[in-house]
């Protein structure tokens, strides 16, 4: 900072500290330096809160709470309930995966159409592509991959869920006189053999 020659008063202020003033003599062609020692203001202790009369009261007597009632078993709780529940959840996940695959296929087709409609794009057989066209080609490949993953995942999960659902044991209440469906693999068979018992 450039200032005129003479004696100046330097004042330093900072929140939480005492203000300090110091005289500095400025002479021509000489760099003037000043060091100040700032001391912090004393810290006030927070006020003591008034006594709380509620703390002086005796603690309340504990109330007797009866134990919670045990849940009644559902009529549908049987040996295959968990497998059926898992199969329904799997079918839901399969539907979501297939939906994602369908959406991704639609986006892939949209990007492909945009590439084909763009007159600046030379065609996929060209080794060099303008940046915008190259980006569209990458998007086509990315959406195609997402679509493929969605369809394959959805198909595998759906198949597994259907197998779980079909092979789940029936509830005990409905098992009398019901048709049962058994699948299994055994020696001398190729694949899965199934039997329906009435």
Image (tube, rainbow, N blue to C red):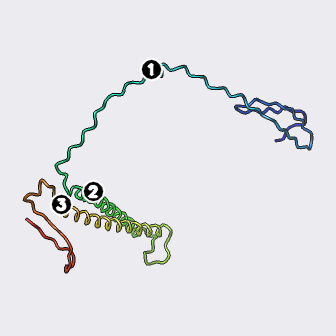
CA distance separating discs 1 and 3: 62 Å
Q: Nearer the viewer, residue 184 or 159?
A: 184
* Residue 12 percent location from the top left of the image: 78, 33
Badge 1 marks a residue whose secondary structure is loop
* Residue 81 percent location from the top left of the image: 21, 55
Residue at point 11% right, 68% down?
A: 196
Q: Nearer the viewer, residue 139 or 175?
A: 175
Residue at point 80% right, 35% down?
A: 37
Q: Disc 1 vs disc 2: which is toward the camera? A: 1
Whichever of labels 1 and 3 marks the residue nearer the N terminus, that label is 1
Q: Residue furthest right?
A: 28
Label 3–label 2 contact, CB within 8 A = no
Badge 2 marks a residue whose secondary structure is helix
Instruction: Look at the image and tell me in which quarter the C terminus lies.
Output: bottom left
Badge 3 marks a residue whose secondary structure is loop
Whichever of labels 1 and 2 marks the residue nearer the N terminus, that label is 1
Q: Which residue is mark 1?
A: 57
Category of crowding for the residue at label 1, using alpha-carbon neighbours closer than 10 angstroms: few (below 14), some (14–19), many (at least 20): few
Category of crowding for the residue at label 2, using alpha-carbon neighbours closer than 10 angstroms: few (below 14), some (14–19), many (at least 20): some
CA distance separating discs 3 and 2: 17 Å
> Which numbered disc covers residue 169?
3
């Amino acid at each position: 900072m450039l200032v005129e020659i003479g004696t100046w008063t330097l004042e330093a202020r900072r929140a939480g500290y005492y203000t300090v003033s110091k005289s500095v003599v400025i002479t021509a062609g000489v760099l003037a330096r000043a060091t100040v020692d700032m001391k912090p203001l004393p810290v006030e202790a927070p006020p003591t809160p008034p006594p709380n009369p509620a703390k002086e009261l005796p603690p309340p007597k504990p109330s007797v709470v009866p134990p919670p009632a045990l849940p009644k078993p559902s009529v549908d709780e049987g040996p295959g309930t968990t497998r059926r529940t898992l199969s329904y959840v799997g079918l839901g996940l399969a539907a979501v995966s297939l939906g994602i695959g369908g959406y991704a296929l639609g986006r892939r087709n949209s990007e492909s159409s945009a590439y084909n409609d763009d007159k600046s794009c030379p065609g996929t057989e060209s080794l060099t592509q303008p940046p915008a066209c190259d980006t569209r080609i990458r998007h086509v490949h990315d959406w195609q991959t997402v679509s493929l993953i969605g369809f394959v995942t959805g198909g595998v999960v759906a198949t597994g869920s259907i197998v779980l659902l079909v092979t789940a044991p029936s509830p005990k209440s409905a098992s009398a006189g019901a048709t049962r469906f058994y699948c299994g693999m055994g020696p001398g068979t190729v694949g899965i053999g199934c039997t329906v018992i009435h």
